[in-house]
Image (tube, rainbow, N blue to C red):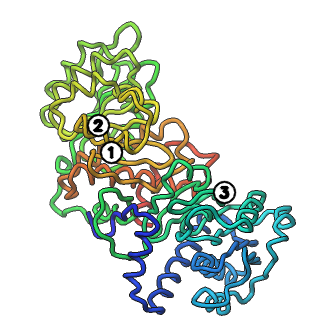
Amino acid sequence: MEPAAALPVLSCAAAAAVEAAAIGGEAGRSFDLMIRAAANLAVRSARLLRRPARRVLVLAGKGNNGADAILAASVFVDEGAEVTVVFAQGAPRAGQPATIWRRFGKGMRVAAAATLPRLARSPFCLILDGVLGQGLRGKPPADLVRFLRATDALQGLRVAVDLPSGLGDDATGPAFRADVTFSLGCLKRPLLAPRARRFVGRLRVVDLGLTFPEAAESCSTDAVLAPLRRPRAADTEKRRQGRLLIVGGSDDFPGAVLMNTLAALRAGAGLVTTALPRTLVPRAATALPEAMWRGLPTDRRGTLATTGWARLRPALANKDALLAGSGMGATAEAFLRRLVRAFAGALVLDADALRPTVVAAARRAAPLVLLPHAGEFRRLSGRAAGVAAAQAYARRTGAIVVLKGPLTCVTDGKRVTHIPFGGPVLARGGSGDLLAGIVAATLARRAELGLDAFDAVVVAATWHGRAADLLGERQGEEAVRTTELLAELSPALLD
C-alpha cells in the first residue's frame, strides 16, 4: 500500500505518546498540528451540513480539545457565522489553549454553562464538542457530569473533536452524544468499545501526517485509493484489467445480480460475464450491454438448477475472479457447492452463498473472500458478529472476512482494517450487492493494480464507503437510490 494508507488503532495513551514524540516539545510544531486538525474538521463538518453554518455552538474545555474546537469554529467566523462558546469550567488561562483563545476567539460570543437549557430551545447548525480530551481516566468530575448531561438537549449536527467528551482509556460515566466523531491522527481504541456505540455516531479519522509504527489493527484512509488514481498503463488491454464471472439471481430475486454486474463494470473490470436464469437474459443484456451473459436453466422454483453449474465449467478456467451468491435463494446450496469446488481463483461469496457447506467446499479458492452482515455471520460461524469473532473465523477458514456494519472491518485472521467511511446512507437494500461487485472487480484487477488480495479488498471497501460519503454529502441520506452510489465512484478518486 501507499504510505499513510492505513492508520493504527491505538489507546489514547499510546496516541498521546506518538503525538508528543512528533512534536518534540516544539510549540510551533504543536500549533501547526492543531491548525491542520482544525482546518480538516471545519471542511468536513461543512460537507456534512450541506448548507452554510449560520449558527455554531462550541463546547470547550481548558485543554487542547477545546482549542481544536475553537480553531475550527474560527473558520466559520471568517465565513460570517454566529459562533457561541460555552466553557465547561471557565476559559483557559495558561498554555497554548489560552493563547489560541485570545488569538482566535475574536468574534465569538461567550455564554455561561448555566445557560445550556436556554440554548437548547433553538437549534444550531453545528455543535462542536471539545470539552474533554484523550487524557480522561475514570469518571469525569461531578460538575462536568452535569454539564455533559445538559448537552443532550442541544439541537444541531453534533460533532465530537477527537472523541466524545467522557470517553477515553478506562473512562466511565456519561459522554457527549455525537452524530459524528473525528478521531485525530489515528483511530482511538475507546471509540470501538461496545459502550461507545451510542456516543460516537459516524466514525471518521483525520490523518494529520504523523508517523506511526506498523500495527496489526488499523483503519483505512483516503490514501488507500492511490492505486486507482494512477494512470492505467498505456499498453494495457481488457484482459489485463480483470476477467470476472458473476453467478447469481433467480426468478424471484433478479435485481441483486444486476447490481453486482453494474458495480463490477463501474469498478473497472475489463471483461465481465454474468450467469443467471435464462429467463432474465434478454432484459439484463438490454440494460447492461457491456457485460456478457450466460443463461442457465432453472428448476420449478425459479432458482438455478443444480445440474446447470456444469455449463459454467469451461468458463471457470480463464477467470481471474468469481463472485457468487446474490439473489440465488436459499435452495441454491447444492448448485453453489459444486460451482465453488471447481474454482481455483479469487472467490467472493455473498448473500445466499454464505453458508457453512459452501465455504467448506471452496477449498481450492485463492483467495476466498466472504462478505457477511451480522445475521449472515451468525449463520456462518454460530457466533455473534464482532471483530474478535470475525478474526477467529478468518483464521479457521483461511478466508478474508469483510464484516459489514456501521463500521465495516476487513480481517484475514492476523490483520484487521476498519473502514471509517460509509454510514447510514448505506442502510438500504442493494448496498451490499454493489460492494460485492466492487470487491470482485478489484480482486480481478489486483495484479494490474499491484495489490495483494487483502489490500485489494481494503481498497474496494474503502472506495465503496467513500462513494457513499460523497452521495450523502451531495444528495443527503434520505431521498436517494442505492445504485446512485455508483455515480460517485469516479468523483471519489478525484476528491
Residue 252, above or below 448 = above
Q: Which corner quadrant of the image does residue 85 belong to? A: bottom right
Q: Position of residue 400 (x, y in %)?
A: 28, 42
Residue type, mark 3 in image: Pro
- Residue 433, x across and y down, in percent: 42, 37
Label 3 near label 2: C-beta < 8 Å? no
> How busy is the neighbourhood of tag 1: few (under 14 within 10 Å), some, or many (20 plus)?
many
Location of mark 2 (residue): 348
The residue identified by callout 1 is: 439
Q: CA distance from mark 1 to mark 3?
A: 39 Å
In the drawing, does residue 58 fall left or right of residue 492?
Answer: right
Asked which secondary structure carries label 3, the reply is loop
Mark 3 Cα shell of 10 Å, populated few (<14), some (14-19), many (≥20)? some
Proximity of marks 2 and 1: CB atoms separated by less than 8 Å: yes
Q: Amino acid at mark 1?
A: Val
Q: Position of residue 196 (x, y in %)?
A: 56, 53
Q: Nearer the viewer, residue 229 or 128?
A: 128
Residue at left offset 52%, top offset 83%? 35
Please name the residue shown 58% across and 78% down the image.
68
Residue for point 62% across, 65% down: 165
The residue wearing badge 3 is 174
Tell me: residue 3, above or below residue 314.
below
Residue 199, image quadrant: bottom right
Mark 2 or mark 3: whose residue is earlier in sequence: 3
Work out which quarter of the rendered image holds the N terminus and state it: bottom left
Residue 126 visible to an observer of this rendering? no
Foreground label between 2 and 3: 3
- Callout 2 amino acid: Val
Q: Is residue 420 visible?
A: yes
**In the image, which is nearer the foreground, mark 1 or mark 3?**
3
- Is residue 298 rendered to the left or right of residue 252? left
Q: Residue at x 59, y 59 (%)?
A: 180
